[in-house]
């Protein structure tokens, strides 16, 4: 793990993998900076995300917090067409690699989601979590920690306490949009 960070505005990659080391989501991003919550990266509208069997271009700008705890990544969307405001990937070893242009993490299936409107906030992908805990043989201590963390995060998202409030991420979304980076729809 590196303590080095790129200059704000520098293009980088956030690379997820699964517990067995197989590749998962790879997001084109830009480094935005850090605050007391951790490091923030952004993905402008139209930038590419890909994993085996799926890909998309970000519908709207989003920012992701990489906290020092290394057990989740908080993504906040601005004006998402389906009202998706918050998506938290619970993870393991979510951190900077030895390459300061690459953040990495192990996707641990459970997610905390907040959608504007009636759907609200919930813990998602419990079925995938149960299945993968057997397939990948997640250690009991990792499972205990992440199950408790999912419920804790769900509560904090519902209460909209920082950094799960709108104001904290909106500062970083404004910084991302001020970069005025063009979409990459041909990636």
Image (spheres, rainbow, N blue to C red):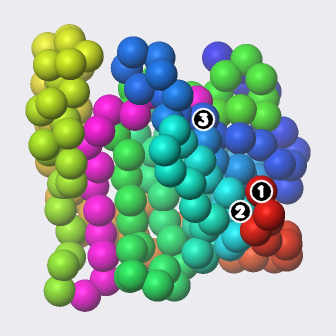
Q: Residue at x 29, y 39 (%)?
A: 109
**Location of the N terminus (image quadrant):** top right
SS category of the residue bearing label 2 = loop
| Classed neighbour count for the residue bearing mark 2: other residues with Cα under 10 Å, few (<14), some (14–19), many (≥20) | many
SS category of the residue bearing label 3 = strand
How many angstroms separate mark 2 from mark 3 (CA)? 14 Å
Q: Residue at x 77, y 23 (%)?
A: 99
- Asked if the stretch drawn in magenta spans residue 107, the answer is yes
Q: Which residue is mark 2?
A: 47
| Classed neighbour count for the residue bearing mark 3: other residues with Cα under 10 Å, few (<14), some (14–19), many (≥20) | many
Question: Start and end of the magenta stretch?
Answer: 104-117
Q: Is residue 136 above or below residue 32?
A: above
Q: Is residue 38 above or below residue 180?
A: above
Asked if one can make out residue 37 in the rendered structure from this viewpoint, the answer is no
Q: Residue at x 25, y 87 (%)?
A: 117
Q: Which residue is mark 1?
A: 187
Q: Nearer the viewer, mark 2 or mark 1?
A: 1
| Classed neighbour count for the residue bearing mark 1: other residues with Cα under 10 Å, few (<14), some (14–19), many (≥20) | few
Asked if one can make out residue 136 in the rendered structure from this viewpoint, the answer is yes
The percent coordinates of residue 22 (x first, y second) are: 48, 22
């Amino acid at each position: 793990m590196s303590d080095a960070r790129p200059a704000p505005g520098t293009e980088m990659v956030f690379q997820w993998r699964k517990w067995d080391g197989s590749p998962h989501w790879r997001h084109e991003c830009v480094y935005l900076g850090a605050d007391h919550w951790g490091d923030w990266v952004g993905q402008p509208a139209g930038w590419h995300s890909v994993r085996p069997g799926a890909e998309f271009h970000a519908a709207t700008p989003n920012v992701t917090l990489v906290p020092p705890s290394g057990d989740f990544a908080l993504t906040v969307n601005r004006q998402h067409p389906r009202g998706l405001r918050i998506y938290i990937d619970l993870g393991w070893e979510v951190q900077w690699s030895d390459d300061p242009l690459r953040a990495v993490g192990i996707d641990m299936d459970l997610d905390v989601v907040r959608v504007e409107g009636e759907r609200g906030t919930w813990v998602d992908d419990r079925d995938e979590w149960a299945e993968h805990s057997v397939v990948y043989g997640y250690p009991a201590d990792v499972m205990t920690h992440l199950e408790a963390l999912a419920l804790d995060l769900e509560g904090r998202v519902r209460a909209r306490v920082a950094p799960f409030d709108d104001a904290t991420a909106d500062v970083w979304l404004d910084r991302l949009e001020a970069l005025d980076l063009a979409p990459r729809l041909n990636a």
